[in-house]
Image (spheres, rainbow, N blue to C red):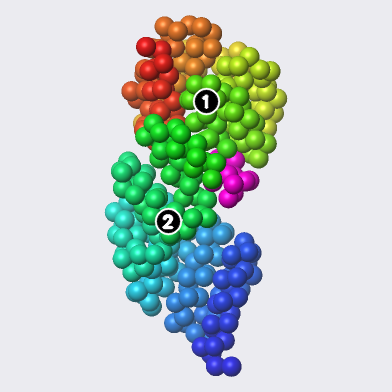
Amino acid sequence: MTAKNRAAAFSSRCGWWWAKKDPDRALSDCNEALRADSNNAAAYLNRGNAYLNKSDFEHAFADFNEAIRLDPKNAWAFAERGNLYKNKGDREHALADLNEAVRLNPGYALAVFFRGDLYRSMGDLPRAMTDMNEAIRLDPNYAPAYFTRGRLSYLLGNNPAALEDFTKSIKLAPEDASAYFNRGVAYYVIGGRTPDAVADFRKATELNPKGAYAALWRDLAERRINAPGHLAEAVKQLDMTVWPAPVIRHFLGELNAEQTFGAAFDTDPKTKLAQTCEANFYSGEFALLKKNNKEAQRLLKLAANDCPPSFVESTAAIAEVILLK
């Protein structure tokens, strides 16, 4: 066997191992491939993905760089590096890489999906929706694309479309707690679907018992239909030293509204904005449950005006304000 053939064989098996979520075996095989042929771009790509499995983003980034240097027409390498740039918050380089990936291979669904998710994070919802539609056309069985398109529809106020896509996402990936949670939020916002919301939040908490927001929304939905609450039991699984613990303590009667708002303070402006938004929204919902509509309207208006558009609380607050008019 020639060195190149040996490298190709080890690289192929490396790819198989990282796809099976066994990064240590993958790294061993990719290292062997690169010892046999240091110019094997596929081995760098596979090793980069193995590093991603281990959350070693620095080494993954270096390997994707090398893969692109060796094979500048490899759409996969540009897509992977672009997604890393996106996750690092470097939107300019992310968009350049993802555009190049789509240019090199217009039929590459994952690259289109990554770009659409980047547009979503940039607040460009129309372009994000266009890319999600295309990603689903290219790969009708890709659950994350349905989930992300569902989130976009929810943010745009189209709850029926959001529900349809979250349901498709759940059928394709039934163990994804976030899909149940987001569908539950959409059900909660639609009048008359609160029992469905309770069922979805319950499933989300079963799949992820440490999910504080699912536990919080489940309590909101249960209170809305006068069903027995489960928040006190859920707290046993939650980290009550971090946000949104003060909101949960408010719902349990351990903190008053003033103490909850005080706990939302943070020296980082973005964190403070996010926590203040949530304090306003959940306190508004709590006031609504207590039949204090005037206070609920005041707080929910603050949430509708101040919450970042990407927050589920933003769209929910807007919907509640409309209902309270």
Q: Residue at x 38, y 18 (%)?
A: 322
Q: Residue at x 44, y 53 (%)?
A: 136
**Secondary structure mainly formed by the magenta segment:** helix
Where 186 sits versus 321, above or below? below
Q: Quadrant of the N terminus?
A: bottom right
Q: Helix, strand, or loop for circle 2?
A: helix
Q: Which mark is residue 188?
A: 1
- In the depicted structure, whether residue 28 falls above or below residue 99: below
- Give percent across and percent down for residue 26: 60, 70
Would residue 83 be visible to someone looking at this image?
Answer: no
Query: Magenta region: which residues?
Result: 169-179
Q: Quadrant of the C terminus?
A: top left
217 left or right of 228? left
Instruction: Kindly identify the amino acid type of the residue bearing the numbered disc 1.
Output: Tyr
Residue 101: x percent and y percent?
35, 65
Q: Quadrant of residue 25?
A: bottom right
Kind of residue sitting beneath label 2: Arg
Residue topped by disc 2: 137
Tag 2 or tag 1, which sits nearer the N-term? Answer: 2
Q: Is residue 231 above or below residue 26?
A: above
Residue that extends furthest to the bottom in the rendered view of this protein: 1
Residue 37 to residue 200: above or below: below
Front position among marks 1 and 2: 2
Q: Quadrant of residue 68?
A: bottom left
Which residue is drawn at the image coordinates 42% and 6% (left, top)?
294
Q: Nearer the viewer, residue 186 or 220?
A: 186
- Residue 130 falls inside the magenta stretch: no
For mark 2, does the 10 Å Cα neighbourhood hold few (<14), some (14 to 19), or many (20 or more) residues?
few
SS of the residue at dot 1? helix
- Residue drawn at point x = 63 percent, y = 30 percent: 199
